[in-house]
Image: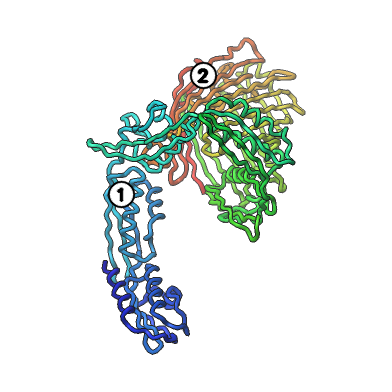
Amino acid sequence: MRNFLLKIVTLFFFLTTAVNSEVIKKFDISGNKRISDETIITFSNINLNEEITKSKLDNAIKKLYKTNFFRNIIFNFENQILYLRVEENPIIENLQIDGIKKQSLVEFIKNKMNLAEMRSFNQELLSADLDLINNILKTNGFYFAEISSSKNVNDQLNSVDLKIDIKLGEKAKIKKIIFLGEKVFKDKRLKEVIASDEHKFWKFISRNVYINQELIQLDQRLLETFFKNNGYYSVKIENSFVEFDKNSNFNLIFNITPGKKYIFNNFTLNLPSNYDPNLFKTIVKKFAKFKGKTYSLLKINGLLNDIDKIALTKQYEFINASITEKIKDDKIDFEIDISESEKIYIEKININGNFNTLEEVIRNNLIVDEGDPFNEILFNKSINNIQSLGIFKKVETKVQEGSQDRFKIIDLDVEERPTGEISVSAGFGTQGGTIGAGIKENNFLGKGINLNTNLEITEDSVKGQFVYAKPNFNYSDNTLFTSLKSSSSDFLTDSGYKTSELGFSVGTRFEQFQNIYLSPELDFLIEDLETSNKASNTIKKQEGSYTDLYFNYSINQDLRDKKFRTEDGFVTTFSQELPIVSDNSEIANSFDITKYKKFSTRSDAVGKVSFFGKTITGLSDDVRISKRLYIPSYRLRGFEKGKVGPVDNNDYIGGNHLTSVNMSATLPNILEGIDNLDVGVFLDAANIWGVDYDSSLDDKSAIRSSAGVALNLMTPIGPLSFSFANAITKASSDKTETFRFNLGTQF
């Protein structure tokens, strides 16, 4: 109020005091400590040798107050000198927000506030910011929050320490969800559609049982889409609101007018004269199957996506598809007009935020380039390629107008993540444990090169590996990788044999067809097998040195919606190992398919189901013991690595055939206030069997299964993961492992 009165008085002074239309020859500025004379003159928009009027002085005062630098301003013009007396607002030295544990929410509030550290303090802005904070908290469900502020003023430094205290109180729980309007669907079904949920005591880990305005807006869109997918073309979600009932409960209310239910009728597809109609026959046939069936927005969007795919495949890159809908009674006629649009070209691609990563690494992953016609599908795929490198937290784009018509400038902003990682791991089971360590760098020298070295030690073996991978090798779309591996296993005491291996591999990976990748590889291996009197006769027969050269290849189809935090889609891989030169030849085949699916819009929970199968067959002799199959620990949690399957003289000799099924659900951020914790549950089942070199051995064929919980916590020193598993079914000779952890730190 004081500032407002000062402004009124100042303006009144200039409205009642005569100011002659004279030219200003000099500025006389006083009272400013932080703000320079030049800055004040610039913001006033008054220049030397300029004619001074009441209007210009009035505007100058308004402009200077608008900067929020000053709490008092006095002008006086005399003898062609403009005297300006100012009183600066104090600067905010420290800004502290207490009472909110969730740091991401604190940062969000600070980014939205008008006031900030090293900015000028203003009481009016503080009042506005307190209202802003209150609205943000309500949006996040904190309807009962109490907000207060205090400040510590240092008159000598003209500074302020500002503190905002927040008592969040309990979140506003949704006690009941009510749907008003004509009942064409049961309330139970509509509750399954929306993300918000009624609070029940067993839903204590859910974040969707609290009032959240953004979630309510999402609910409206979900309801509208649901009704339109079920024939209600003209549905209206007229309003949604929160009601505070007499029992102090919150009710979430949606007012729905579904309208009439419609069916598909006739369909017309109009193409440009130079388009081949045969290419679009599948579109026409698909719609023909829709006729007479319930209208669905999902089916229409599917048709448009199919048109986009045809256009891309046949290089009809610039097309528009406009839909005309004609309604008669309860039927809808659809007419889709395909037309060519003007080509839009990429004038320039600006890449920002890559402080450590070389620009060429990013550009090599772009399918489109400067000067190319702009194709949204290809550009989106380019962005996905960059995200898949795993070296950026964020990849954002902004399209701006170019220097001339039909040209666009693309700003590509990246935020780098720490790409170096040091990790340690350990597992503890019934017969001892395993420890491991590794060093990984995903962006060596800023070139996107992957370097990975790891070491695993058990009570009877040591394994090490070094991997080098270079994407976009020789400026191509291919990835070149090579690895060096070494291992040593000593079972002389218990089983009478030991092995040592040294191997080298080189390969590449490239996209053969859309989303289908081919990975050929050459593997070279030298192995020595030494036995003692304790070894079985079968293993003694295998004693000696071996040299192998194998050709391996894999075909991979990746149809995931995104590479990280996948929510939908699947990955399929087929691999084969073929001998070129070998002292003991084998052929191996494997198949792996993994399906991802987000459970619902109510949460971020994602389910995953994976099936894996592998078999190996000796071509000239029995499969030697080092080449036999073992169940990987990540496919059968709760069991010790390599301590499952057929046994020969107390030695686990692996099998010829392996299958596994894995089901899991990841529940990210399910615990309120702990954003960096993911909880998962899993059920694993696997079997390994087949003993080709001695039919007298018991192959211990049995279905192994386990269930457990996995915790992934991001700590200040890196990601920490725990898994707790319990074996459900097993063979008598199998060794179990209940607990495993991994800890890594990034640099």
Q: Residue furthest top?
A: 696
Q: Quick check: 619 left or right of 571?
A: right
Q: Residues within 10 Å of mark 1 (few under 14, many from 20)?
A: few
Identify residue type, mark 2: Arg
Residue 36, horizontal then vertical, whole percent: 42, 76
- Number of residue marks: 2
Q: Any mark on residue 704, and which?
A: 2
Q: Residue at x 54, y 15 (%)?
A: 702
- Comes first in the chain, label 2 or label 1: 1
Res. 180 image quadrant: top left
Please report contact status of discs 2 and 1: CB closer than 8 Å, yes or no: no
* 92 or 200, nearer to the observer: 200
Q: Quick check: 256 left or right of 380?
A: left
Q: Secondary structure at mark 2?
A: strand
Residue 624, horizontal then vertical, whole percent: 67, 22
Q: Quick check: 626 left or right of 259?
A: right
Q: Is residue 485 visible?
A: no
Q: Residue at x 55, y 55 (%)?
A: 353
Which is closer to the viewer, label 2 or label 1?
Answer: 1
Q: Residue furthest front?
A: 328
Residue 525, horizontal then vertical, whole percent: 70, 32
Q: Residue furthest bottom?
A: 79
Residue where numbered disc 1 is placed: 99
Identify residue type, mark 1: Gly
* 138 or 462, nearer to the observer: 138
* 118 or 403, nearer to the observer: 403
Q: Residue at x 28, y 66 (%)?
A: 153
| Residue 524 vertical position relative to residue 690 in the rendered view, above or below | below
Query: CA gap, disc 2 to disc 1?
Result: 49 Å
